[in-house]
Amino acid sequence: MRQNPKAMMVIVAAAALIAVSGCGSPGTDGYGASSSPPSGASSSAPQSGTATITITITIKDFGYQGPVSVSPGAKITVKNQDAQAHTVTSDDGKAFDAAADGGGGTATFTAPTTPGSYPYHCAYHSNMHGTLVVK
Ligand SMILES: [Cu+2]
């Protein structure tokens, strides 16, 4: 099996598109993610033939982009596309806490096994907020 160079081209093009469309925000206005636009959402569907589903929360422009609801105990990957380090820290300080370095750093954590709504924030930037719903 040879690797398909076209696949990489698509990924690069998609990343560039996201980078361009994401500009224009100083990142400190605290604009909420509760009404996030649907643009680009179709490209985040994981392709998996196994029982393991990888869920990704992407951090960009001081905001969280990702699914709001996950299965109990789901494995979640955090991808940080900002230059600054960010965290995904549950507001209760116990449910989860993942830190991702800036410049493409990643981190992983496991979603709570108890269904519920888990608000989270960035430990470094108090204006960054998101909510993870486990159901
Ligand atoms: Cu941050």
Image: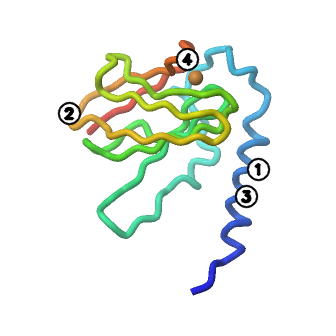
* Residue with the mark numbered 4: 124
Question: Between marks 4 and 1, how big is the CA–CA gap?
Answer: 26 Å
Question: Between marks 2 and 3, how big is the CA–CA gap?
Answer: 37 Å
* Residue with the mark numbered 2: 114
Q: What amino acid type is highlighted by mark number 3?
A: Val
Q: Which of the 4 image quadrants contains residue 108?
A: top left
Q: Position of residue 94 (x, y in %)?
A: 29, 22
* Residue with the mark numbered 1: 16
Q: In the image, what residue occupies the spot 31% across and 46% down?
A: 74
Counting residues from the start of the chain, the first of labels 2 and 4 encountered is: 2
Q: Position of residue 52 (x, y in %)?
A: 33, 59
Cβ at disc 4 under 8 Å from ligand 1: yes
Q: Which secondary structure lies at badge 1?
A: helix
Q: What amino acid type is highlighted by mark number 2?
A: Thr
Question: Between marks 2 and 4, how big is the CA–CA gap?
Answer: 27 Å
Q: Which of the 4 image quadrants contains residue 105?
A: top right
- Within-10-Å neighbours for mark 4: few <14, some 14–19, many 20+: some
Q: In the image, what residue occupies the spot 58% across and 34% down?
A: 101
Q: What amino acid type is highlighted by mark number 1?
A: Ala
Counting residues from the start of the chain, the first of labels 2 and 1 encountered is: 1
Discs 1, 3 touching: Cβ within 8 Å: yes
